[in-house]
Every structure is written in C-alpha cells, then in structure tokens.
Image (tube, rainbow, N blue to C red):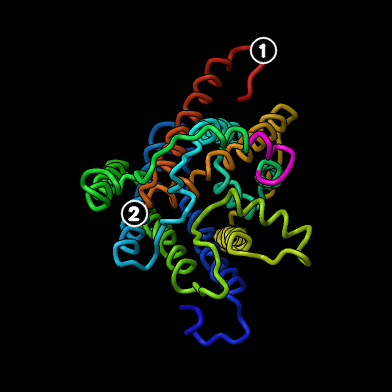
Amino acid sequence: MFDQLGFDNLTPKLASVIFALVIGLIFGSISQRIKFCFRRSIVGSGQERKSAQGVWFAALASAIIGTQLLIFYNFISFSEHRFFNSNMPLLAIIFGGIMFGVGMVLTRGCISRLVVLTGTGNIRAFIVFIVFAITAHATLKGIFAPIRVWLGSFTLNLNEVTGFSKLIGGPILWSIIIFSLSILIAYRSKSKTSHLILAVFIGLLVPLSYLGTGFILFDEFDPIQLESLSFTSPSSDLLFWTIASSAIPAGFGVGLLGGVLLGSFISAITRNEFKWITFENQQQTKQYLIGASLMGSGGVLAGGCTVGAGLSGVPTLSFAAIIALIFIVFGAISAKYLINLTKNSNYSFA
C-alpha cells in the first residue's frame, strides 16, 4: 500500500521510524501516567497488584480484539512470523521466560517500565536499560549467541498447529475466551476508570502498529518487517544504531524506543514528576545489574518481553508467545518467593 501514498522521498523504513516515534510517544506518555507495569500485576502487594492487573489486562483485551479483527479482514498475516514457527524452540522459551521473570523482580520493573522510568530521570532504570541492551545484543549476535543457538536447537515440532487459532473453535472462540477473562480481571480489579480507559488505548497501539508495518507501510519492492510494541530486539537495535548509525539505518524499534523515552519525559515534566533517582547502595547496584543481565538474555531466548511476547504476542494466539508469558510469570513468582525466604538471612537481594 505504501507505493500508493505518494511519498517520493520517503522510504518505507524511514516512514516506519516516524510512525514508531508517534506510537512510542503515546505509549510512553500514557504508561508514565498510569504506571503501566506487568511486574506489579504479578508480585505487587494488595490493591496495588490488583490495580496493575486491571490495567494490564484491559490493555490486553483491546489488543486481542484489534489484532484478531485485522487478521479476520486479511489486513495482516502471521503465517511467516517467528511466533508461528512450526519448530518451536521450547527449551529456549522456558529458560528465557524464567530468566526474564527473575530479572524483572530484581530490577523491580519489566524493561518497558524501566524505559519509561528512564525518561523521568531515573538513573537506576537508565543503567538497567543500557545493561539490558548490551546483554540482549550479546545474546542475539555476540558472545552469548552460541548458547542461544544451542538452546534453540531443542525444538518441539508443532507441524501446522502453532497457535490456538488452529484448535477446535478456531480464532473466534479462543479470542472470546481470552478477551472475556481479561475483561473480568479488569472489572474486578477496582482500578480507576480513567486508568482502565487509558490502558485500552495502550492495547490499541498493538494492532495499530501491526496495521502500520504490515499493511499501510508495506511495499513489495522494499518490504519491512511486521512489528508491534516490543522492547528486547529494539533495545539491541538502538544500541547498535547508536554506535554505528552511519552504517546501520534506524528502523521501527529505534523509533519506538525514542518515542517512549520522549513521551515519558514530556509526561513527567508536565506532571511535575521528573526526578533524578540513583542507586541507594552497593547491594542494590549489584541486584539491578544481575537483574538487567538476566532480562536481556532472557528476553532474547524467550522471544520477547512482557510487552513483546505478552501484550503484542498473546493477541496473535501464538503458543510460543503464551508459553513465554507463562514462564515469565513463573520466574517472577519464584524469585519473589525466594527473596522473601532470604529477607532475614545474612545475604539478600531485596
């Protein structure tokens, strides 16, 4: 469709950067306002946890409806997407999910939340973001890549049944089930109505991104990748682009992260919430660095983070995305349990 828009001096890739910048601005500003965070919905305490659950699942509900409608009307297709690889790298997804879940507990935030916090002046979050990007890149293309390849060799052959849409009932039934559960959780959370509404807009950014990269900006002579909200691979891309921008052009991921940082910064400034925050002591520094490393490598192995595999992946009804999210939750709960056990010992992460 891109060739019909009449942009003579704009390539699809450059257009995707601009498009992603706008998506990121919206995500960053809303997330900063409502404290959008998957970690809090899993290991938070009391009403804070329930409110975070309501917000996250309200976003998931709108993401599911929007994404499945795009698929139903043939605007986009995931037939060639990595989420639907017939040879699912199950061991890598399991280990990666657990690593990411443990890491986000140690850093007290999943990577999307920490990128948003970076824009508000949180130096802790910024350092975690940098370490996350380095370890993610090292796992994708650097010294940890052989481990990724080895773990990825242990696959489960799914043939053509790579998602819930291939099961009895098809995509309509399973979309309704996941949507209904999400709405129920959001309804029972007692979250602020304004926060739930804003969360719905965050969720709609998922299908909007898919529509933009997979249909509006699609050009068969200069194709770009079908992408949506994600933070693992884009962090690696941003790191690589930052140090080699003259050789490597920016893509959707770079624009997305730039927009998120700018959006959260603007929101924090206008709400008088910008504040410089750093590490409290050596113990906390060590905890965050370990958590950042686990999240970076784990996010790559799992095929995405709580946003990439969760908010953007689950609406595709992919088995791989849903399994990744399940083991992220398992890793987070396990880490929180172990931390609580060691609180009264001589050595503790918390």
Q: Mark yes or no: residue 44 visible.
A: no
Q: Is residue 232 visible?
A: yes
Above or below for 189 versus 151: below
Q: Main secondary structure of the magenta part?
A: helix
Q: Earlier in the sequence, mark 1 or mark 2?
A: 2
- What residue appears at the point 59 percent right and 48 percent down from the top-left corner? 232
How far across and down, in percent of the image, does residue 46 sit?
40, 32
| Rendering coords of residue 336 (x, y %) | 51, 25
Tag shown at residue 346: 1
Q: Dot 1: within a 10 Å radius of its alpha carbon, few (fewer than 14), some, or many (20 or more) residues? A: few
Q: Residue at x 53, y 15 (%)?
A: 341
Q: Which residue is mark 2?
A: 64
* Nearer the camera: disc 1 or disc 2: 2
**143 falls in the magenta region:** yes
**Above or below — where is 159 with respect to 333?**
below
Magenta span: 140-148
| Residue closest to the eye, 276 or 177 | 177
Residue 309 magenta-highlighted = no
Q: Residue at x 55, y 67 (%)?
A: 224
Residue 95 screen position, x and y as percent = 54, 30
Query: Is 237 situated left or right of 68 in this image?
Result: right
Instruction: Residue at 35% x, 53% y: name it.
Output: 196
Q: Position of residue 42 (x, y in %)?
A: 44, 34
Q: Find numbered disc 2 in the image and state the secondary structure of the residue it sits on.
A: helix
Quadrant where the C terminus sits is top right
User: Which amino acid type is shown beneath numbered disc 1?
Assistant: Asn
**Left or right: 142 as drawn, with respect to 49:** right
Identify residue type, mark 2: Ile
Where on the picture, by quarter, is residue 349?
A: top right
Pick the quarter of the image with the N terminus.
bottom left
